[in-house]
Amino acid sequence: MDEITVTGGFWREYQSLNAESIIGHCLEWMERVGWIRNFDLAAAGTLGSDHAGIEFVDSEVYKLLEAMAWELGRSADEALAATYSSLVARVAAAQESDGYLHTSFGHPGQRERFSDLEWGHELYCFGHLLQAAVARLRTGHDDDLPAVARRVADMLYREFGPGGRTAVCGHPEIEPALAEFARATGDKRYFELARLFVERRGTGTLAPIEYGPEYFQDDVPVRDAEVLRGHAVRALYLAAGALDVAVDTDDVALKNAVARQWENTVARRTYITGGIGSHHRDESFGADFELPPDRAYSETCAGIASIMLSWRLLLATGEARYADHIERTLLNNVLASPRADGRAFFYTNTLHQRTAGVPPHPTDVSKRADSSMRAPWFEVSCCPTNVARTLANIPLYFATADDAGVQLHHYGDYRVDTRVGGERVALTVATDYPFDGEIAVTIHAAPLAGLRLSLRIPAWAREGATWRCADPTVTFELLEGHVAVSGACAAGTVIRLDLPVQPRLTFPDPRIDAIRGEVAVERGPLVLALESVDLPQGVTLDQVRLDTSAPLEGTAAGATAHLSVVAHGAGGEWPYGGAHTVASEALGPVSLIPYYRWANRGPSTMRVFTPIADSNSETA
Ligand SMILES: [Zn+2]
């Protein structure tokens, strides 16, 4: 965390938004709705049926603690440090003598511990507690929260470890959390427990539920599955934990199984934004190519979980396609969630809003996905705190180092100060990316024997990307997904990379029936959207067609595209009929904005994919 520092620009704005708005917003709401008070009541021995919120709200407090710990690692803000310590103390006070710590089970009038592994989310909550402790350990503090987490993990090891009950939690999360906690503490027992949970999954230990065993990935053992399926967040957290287990046990078959599932899921079950999940009913994946834009569930948490999995695959393989997918998902799915002021969030991320949304009241709690605009808080409020913890550790995704050199996976204004082969490497990256493709990397310190630096070339930039350095002894080699830079790289050496970010048309696979005959516009790493507030008065989104023969023009952050308007009939009694030509009228160039920014200018309709202008295939 202290080796990569954001110095300004796009990511500094998001770090500030998180520190100044999102974290405080989540804290205020959890005080208001009583989710933190649950811990106080548990500590006082008076918690019972008056528990506030659904049974897994502890996890939101833990995700906020994780966000605060990462943020404290960056900023050492004294007021935040005091808030953090007081919140940790309230959580710690609720821990029982044997390490158990949950506000929804085991208290008078509540259900027994571990009596509802299908829906209880107990281990899911413990997983988030462990990850909050990992953030604290990784930012240099082995203090109160890690101590609480050790007692929880020891309790879990006794309960579910070797010789314990052969069971798993209905919502995966404990798996990656235990693996991370084992790495952060060096205690191998926690890793062994993660492995047991991964191996037990898919063997039918969970009781039948209405959505079937696929919902919680209990239908097939992880190593036998071909694709991610069922509840999207569950599937991805499990896959992340399985990959951790595969890497630390050198289990090539398991690693390949997870990589295969990622590949099949990205190829057939993912929206252009990186969003996943097309069933609202059970927040699950649909069948292959079942990706209706107006029914996209595309939960923010699923995008975050997808980034967690892609990140692990990138670390395990070094393959740039995983970093490409992190970038797509981060910029176009996860960043779409917070409103520009950081005080309201999308839970689901539709790609086609048919009717203008209704702004939720600022003090109302929304029914999770029911909100048609970003909402300040939800009954199930998993997404805001997940956004907070992700933005709080965002620089960790930017770069890696190994014995060979330094690898830059993402571009922004940041500084890297690390060691390669025992020698210092320091560099700064400066760019207006993602809006501009010019990237300058300045070397400040390199090993005596020279530096090897890898710069990711996103898939959309493979043709047209250029690189140069004024020092002729610095060499470049284009490899799969990145350019390898080698040279003495004396202090002051500047390496320049230019990625072509001009707007481009993107056509969907025709098997995605819901958007056949439609086209999207992307600009660099950004998916663009057409929002009704950018249309001329009197024109509606369902009338517009995109003229693919006219040039797209880049704007500061988005693009303009040539649209035409079709005249709908008066509205017949039956919306079907024979093919005939419709009249259309050119509208000229219209602005498209980055998708992640939509719905920040009041209620609107929006679409990512627009029908291609073709008068012969339409009915009036
Ligand atoms: Zn969520």
Image (cartoon, rainbow, N blue to C red):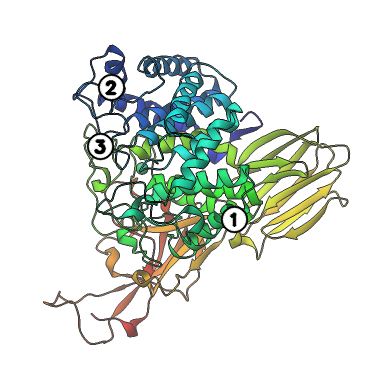
Viewer-closest of 13 and 458: 458
Report the image quarter containing ligand 1: top left
The answer to whether residue 387 is visible is yes
Question: On residue 379, which mark appears?
Answer: 3
Q: Sequence order check: which comes first, mark 2 or mark 1?
A: 2
Residue 296 position, x and y percent, is 34, 57
Rounded to the nearest angstrom, the CA distance separating label 2 from label 1 is 43 Å
Front disc: 1 or 3: 1
* Residue at image mark 1: 253
Q: Amino acid at mark 2?
A: Asn
Left or right, residue 195 beside residue 580: right
Q: Amino acid at mark 3?
A: Glu
Viewer-closest of 36 and 92: 92
Front disc: 2 or 1: 1
> Looking at the image, is 24 positioned above or below residue 465?
above
Front disc: 2 or 3: 2
Left or right, residue 337 beside residue 49: right
* Residue at image mark 2: 38
Q: Sequence order check: which comes first, mark 1 or mark 3?
A: 1
